[in-house]
Image: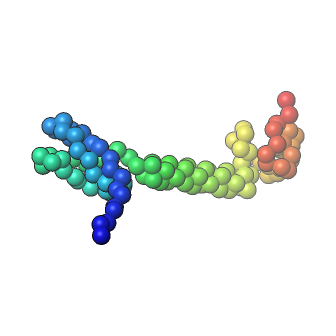
Amino acid sequence: MGVIIEVELVTEICCSCGMAFAFPKNLQDKFRQKHDRFYCPLGHGQYYSGETEAERLRKLFLEEQAENTSLKDELTALKKRVDAGMCPHCHRHFANVSRHLKTKHGIGAGWGEEPKG
């Protein structure tokens, strides 16, 4: 009684000697994910140095998260300045900033409105 095993092989070419060799796909996935060292049949060590998709997405996520934190900090600082009476447009101090924004800059109570003219 025999056993049949199917294994998907991938081929690589050694970056040192140029020899073609093959190994199972699941090992290639492991080597790519962990940047583990593997060897050609003549013993030359090599590894996948490129960034994986997961690493690229994590890096992008962290960059976006940092940008979001920065924008939140800027918004908090702007709100504090307005609460203290500072106009966010002309950077002057007013006792009633809300009235100043409406009469001088055409901005009502809603902060997302575009100025008139």
117 sits left or right of 39 in the view: right
Q: Residue furthest bottom?
A: 1
* Viewer-proximal residue among 85 and 64: 64
* Viewer-proximal residue among 16 and 72: 16
Q: How many marks?
A: 0
36 sits left or right of 111 in the view: left
Decide: is 115 above or below 24. above
Q: Residue furthest front?
A: 1
Residue displayed at 32% across by 50% down: 9
Residue displayed at 85% across by 50% down: 109
* Viewer-proximal residue among 19 and 74: 19
Residue 31, image x, y percentages: 31, 54
51 sits left or right of 113 in the view: left
66 sits left or right of 77 in the view: left
Is residue 112 visible to the viewer in this orientation of the structure? yes
Residue 36, image x, y percentages: 27, 55
